[in-house]
Image: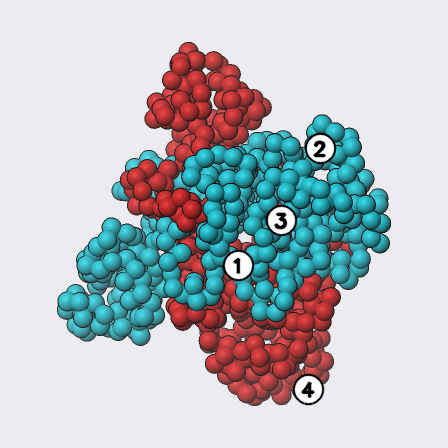
Chain colours: A red, B cyan
């Protein structure tokens, strides 16, 4: 049994909702001891988040919570109680990372800003994820994922021309803020391994979004062109590199689509052959990429007429076998039930959960050969590991833990 | 002060896929040598270009994704001598990041077994569209095709009332490549932290498809627990049932993201006073609006409908940025829907020094682009040099091979 790469890294996880828990899911998958600090008077709203199994939320029966909190442990700690705050500070003293995604200023109001944390544990890596970061004039503004997507330019750049933005149909920036936090935390751990020095990672969700559209920003600052102009966003047609065809086409069945692109003349030739060499494709108006770009409406109409009579997965296999980039626009159910690639790489896993039964999870990416990430336990029930954590991290005795319990610390 | 990865030696062989992973490492202080073919990385041919004039050193896509790297030209396909030089370079590296098709590294003598034989501490990350094995391992992708396969694309789209029969939408900005790069960087740094403890390197099989399939939020849980595929909606979360719209058009024709109206009494009180100061929502003082349950859009109450319609009218009287700032003052997480270049004007981002000036062929004075995705207070993100010209550092990099191999 190979070791886990982050074995020995203890993380005090004060995060909730999605962005922070996404970061700690990755760290936990790779072996960090992620201790999710919870409070019954302010539970992680995702504990109540759909899909729920059963008639009513129990705090432990959310499938979504289970999906993003596997491999973690949960401690109930009332930090408004002086003993609870004392235990939190003692946990920080024996940990490597503290991570939170409250609004800027919340931890400072707990008297736990970075200088204070550093006084408790000089080596601590403190990562705050907030909408706008902990400095700057708008640091008190708040975001949800979609807010960062809107302000950072991701919403406007997704859509059909002449329509309102389609945007992103989920909090892409919650995932991505989480990934950015992981990168910063791991880099800080490497720096600490060499120098002994900890630090504060101040992550702004809006900044983690603006960096995802660098070329579009440069087109503005170099060429003076905004994305707010006629014809943009271009729907599923290409922006850069400008190639045609590049679009989604309907297939047999309801709401079935295939994405197809020809990025070079050989790929266009391969597409033409896959379509059985129709006469229209030999017309001069489609004879070069420039010509096809100029006449995309006619081009897309003809390709759509061909795809709409065909099964999407059969088309994908045919086009890929011919050397054309193409994929079914897979729905969640397609990925789980039909995607042969994920199945052949043993992607879907199960973990037992006391209230949800055998639960299915996606695997761990990326795949490390010597120290792969693993799925070891489903998401914790609220407070499931309170006693265990206090015993193994702080060496508290049963009697001491009982005293704290009686004082109302674990609620 | 210097970055947390200062001293880390990285060799990168990547085109559009993977170049952002190399940038993430380089911007944190790593010395990333980008090995390019004589004609240059494919990203050098991706626009937009400076003044729309193509040229190997004029691609803004390349400029952005290759900051802080050095460029060395080696003809890996055509020259055994150059392949040998690449092996020598990787023998002295900590990290080898490549996005070659599966099997191609072995054909070039750049496979992990060969490389690790002389450099056991090496972390070799192979970033590919679908991973090293499986029936789709040889499939071709573009950013859009990868997002279609991995699932993110199916989350984005329209209400039938806005665009009947609309397909899933490809959000632009190379987000499939970006997510894949995040996973590659996370994997490399995880392996690096492990190596700090053990001294041992390893191979990483990073599949863009698996990265994307891990990045669709509630999409999978709804299927896994209820067997339901969610439906796409205009400018807001895909869901199992159709929900209240989030986008409203402001006076200046720009859209505003509006949600969580009336969720808390505190923000409701502030929103009400703000609207009333502009002559809207006069009847919101009626007692029936005081109950948060009555204000919840999901419950379909007449009050929620009235609030929604009045807020929509109110927004048409203001500019988008003013709606954003006014709502934030009420504690509401609304946002203006900005074009990427419009964020450059945000004073808060300037306070934080977020945008940095870069230079290159045709741009002497410096042009702003997004900088640090994270602020590390002890080891800050830094733009040390702009993206390299093609082959700018070939001689310097090869000269570095003449000394003894570090132990």
Q: Residues within 10 Å of mark 2 (few under 14, many from 20)?
A: many
Q: Which mark is residue B372?
A: 1
Residue named by callout 3: B69
- Mark 2 highlights which residue? B76
Image quadrant where residue A33 sits? bottom right
N-terminal of the two: label 1 or label 2? 2
Question: Badge 3: few (under 14), some or many (20 or more) residues near its Cα, within 10 Å?
Answer: many
Residue A127: image x %, image y %?
57, 68
SS of the residue at dot 4? helix
The chain letter under disc 4 is A
Q: Which residue is mark 4?
A: A399
Q: Secondary structure at mark 1?
A: loop
> Whole-percent x and y of residue B319?
25, 58
Looking at the rendered structure, the number of numbered marks drawn on it comes to 4
Q: CA distance from mark 4 to mark 2?
A: 67 Å
Sequence-first disc among 1 and 3: 3
For residue B125, above or below residue B3: above
Rounded to the nearest angstrom, the CA distance separating label 1 from label 2 is 33 Å
**Foreground disc of the pair 4, 2:** 2
- Quadrant in the rendering for residue B318: bottom left
Decide if residue B268 is on the left or right side of residue A321: left
Disc 2 from disc 3: Cα separation:
19 Å
In this orientation, which residue lies closer to the viewer: B154 or A142?
Answer: A142
Is residue B348 placed above or below A311 in the rendered structure? below
């Amino acid at each position: 049994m190979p070791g886990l790469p982050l074995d020995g890294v203890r993380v005090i996880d004060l995060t909730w909702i999605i962005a922070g828990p996404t970061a700690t899911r990755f760290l936990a998958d790779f072996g960090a001891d992620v201790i999710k600090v919870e409070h019954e008077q302010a539970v992680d709203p995702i504990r109540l988040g759909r899909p729920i199994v059963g008639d009513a939320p129990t705090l432990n029966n959310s499938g979504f919570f289970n999906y993003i909190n596997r491999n973690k442990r949960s401690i109930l700690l009332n930090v408004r109680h002086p003993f609870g705050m004392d235990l939190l500070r003692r946990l920080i003293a024996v940990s490597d990372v503290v991570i939170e995604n409250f609004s800027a200023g919340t931890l400072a109001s707990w008297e736990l800003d970075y200088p204070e944390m550093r006084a408790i544990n000089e080596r601590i890596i403190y990562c705050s994820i907030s909408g706008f970061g902990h400095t700057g004039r708008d640091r008190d503004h708040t975001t949800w994922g979609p807010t960062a997507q809107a302000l950072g330019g991701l919403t406007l750049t997704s859509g059909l021309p002449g329509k309102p933005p389609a945007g992103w149909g989920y909090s892409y920036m919650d995932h991505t803020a989480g990934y950015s936090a992981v990168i910063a935390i791991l880099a800080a751990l490497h720096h600490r391994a060499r120098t002994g020095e900890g630090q504060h990672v101040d992550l702004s969700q809006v900044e983690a979004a603006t960096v995802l559209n660098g070329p579009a920003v440069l087109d503005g600052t170099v060429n003076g062109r905004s994305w707010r102009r006629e014809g943009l966003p271009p729907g599923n047609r290409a922006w850069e590199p400008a190639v045609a065809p590049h679009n989604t086409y309907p297939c047999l069945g309801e709401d079935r689509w295939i994405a197809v692109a020809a990025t070079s003349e050989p790929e266009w030739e391969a597409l033409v052959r896959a379509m059985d060499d129709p006469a229209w494709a030999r017309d001069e108006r489609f004879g070069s990429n420039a010509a096809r770009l100029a006449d995309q409406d006619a081009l897309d109409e003809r390709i759509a007429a061909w795809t709409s009579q065909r099964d999407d997965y059969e088309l994908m296999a045919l086009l890929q076998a011919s050397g054309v980039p193409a994929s079914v626009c897979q729905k969640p159910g397609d990925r789980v039930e039909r995607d042969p690639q994920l199945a052949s790489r043993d992607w879907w896993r199960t973990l037992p959960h006391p209230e949800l039964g055998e639960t299915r999870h996606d695997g761990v990416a990326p795949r490390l050969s010597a120290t792969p990430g693993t799925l070891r336990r489903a998401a914790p029930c609220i407070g499931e590991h309170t006693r265990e954590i206090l015993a193994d991290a702080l060496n508290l005795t049963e009697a001491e833990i009982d005293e704290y319990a009686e004082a109302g610390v674990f609620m | 002060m210097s970055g947390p990865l200062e001293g880390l030696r990285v060799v990168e062989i990547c085109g559009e896929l993977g170049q952002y992973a190399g940038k993430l490492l380089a911007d944190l202080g790593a010395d990333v040598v980008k090995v390019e073919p004589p004609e240059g990385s494919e990203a050098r041919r991706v626009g937009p270009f400076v003044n729309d004039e193509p040229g190997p050193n004029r691609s803004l896509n390349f400029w952005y994704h290759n900051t802080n790297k050095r460029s060395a030209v080696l003809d890996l396909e055509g020259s055994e001598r150059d392949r040998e030089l690449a092996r020598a370079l990787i023998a002295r590296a900590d990290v080898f990041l490549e996005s070659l098709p599966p099997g191609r590294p072995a054909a070039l003598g750049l496979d992990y077994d060969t490389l690790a034989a002389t450099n056991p501490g090496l972390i070799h990350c192979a970033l590919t569209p679908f991973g090293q094995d499986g029936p789709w391992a040889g499939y071709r992708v573009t950013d859009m095709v990868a997002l279609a396969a991995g699932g993110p694309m199916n989350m984005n789209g329209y209400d039938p009332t806005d665009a009947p029969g609309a397909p899933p939408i490809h959000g632009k900005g190379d987000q499939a490549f970006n997510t894949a790069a995040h996973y590659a960087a996370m994997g490399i740094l995880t392996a690096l932290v492990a190596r700090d403890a053990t001294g041992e390197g390893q191979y990483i099989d990073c599949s863009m498809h698996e990265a994307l399939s891990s990045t669709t939020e509630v999409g999978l849980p709804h299927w896994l627990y209820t067997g339901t595929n969610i439906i796409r909606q205009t400018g807001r979360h895909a869901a199992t049932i159709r929900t209240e719209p989030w986008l409203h058009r402001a006076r200046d024709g720009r859209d505003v993201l509006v949600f969580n109206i009336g969720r808390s009494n505190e923000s409701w009180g502030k929103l009400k006073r703000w609207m009333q100061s502009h002559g809207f929502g006069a009847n919101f003082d009626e007692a029936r609006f005081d109950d948060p349950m009555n204000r919840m859009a999901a419950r379909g109450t007449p009050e929620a409908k009235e609030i929604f319609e009045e807020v929509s009218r109110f927004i048409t009287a203001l500019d988008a940025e003013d709606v954003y700032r006014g709502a934030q003052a009420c504690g509401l997480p609304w946002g203006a829907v900005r074009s990427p270049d419009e964020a450059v004007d945000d004073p808060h981002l300037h306070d934080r020094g977020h945008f940095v000036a870069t230079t290159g062929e045709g741009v002497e004075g410096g042009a702003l682009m997004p900088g640090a995705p994270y602020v590390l207070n002890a080891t800050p993100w830094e733009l040390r040099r702009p993206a390299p010209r093609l082959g700018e550092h070939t001689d310097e990099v090869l000269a570095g091979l003449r000394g003894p191999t570090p132990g």
